[in-house]
Amino acid sequence: MEIEKIFKNLILIDFLILILIVISSLYQSNDLIEINKNLNKGLIAEYQNFFRIISLVLFFLYLLTLNLLYRFITYGKYLYLFLVISGIILNFLKGASVYSSFGSVLDATGSLISGAILILLFYSPIRENFK
């Protein structure tokens, strides 16, 4: 039972970090915005609208998936893995970007939490709750 509590707390922390990342991206300094405009763009630079739509879809799917994981619904496990891998691929394709120190800490912490959730999903007794 203790590992379930840890797992659910990690999901809640992941949700909180996701909300903080969205809020911090809304309040970026003008200097960071200008620097990001002048950076070399990635492979999908010519498809900005497509990238934004895909990002929004993945964002809302991620929120849904966190809910599915919190309630131990089976397909949430595989959807979460798909979304993490999709996020990594999209970050690679979008090219370079500059974050504030706070945004960088949130990004790194979110990555660590996602890794911990994946480890618990596939290599701990939590996986038995998804059957």
Image (cartoon, grey):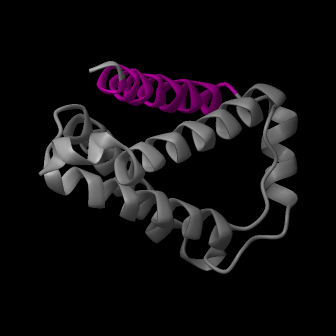
Q: Residue 43: image x %, image y %?
A: 67, 80
Q: Quadrant of residue 31?
A: top right
What residue is drawn where x is 17% and y is 47%? 130
In the displayed structure, does residue 52 sit left or right of residue 25?
left
Quadrant showing the N terminus = top left
Q: Is residue 40 left or right of residue 9?
A: right
Is residue 2 one of those drawn in magenta?
A: no
Compared to 21, does 65 lie above or below? Answer: below
Q: Nearer the viewer, residue 8 or 21?
A: 8
Magenta-drawn segment: 3-27
**Residue depicted at x 44% and y 41%:** 117
Q: Is residue 22 magenta?
A: yes
Q: Is residue 77 above or below residue 82?
A: above
Q: Between residue 52 and residue 3, name the one nearer to us.
A: 3
Indicate the position of residue 88 as horizontal and vertical percent values: 58, 63
Q: Is residue 102 left or right of residue 56?
A: right
Q: Is residue 45 visible?
A: yes
User: Residue sitting at 47 percent across and 66 percent down?
Assistant: 86
Question: How far from the left and from the top, in percent, is residue 94?
Answer: 65, 67
Quick check: can you spot residue 53?
Answer: no
Instruction: Give the prevailing secondary structure in the magenta stretch.
Output: helix
Badge count: 0
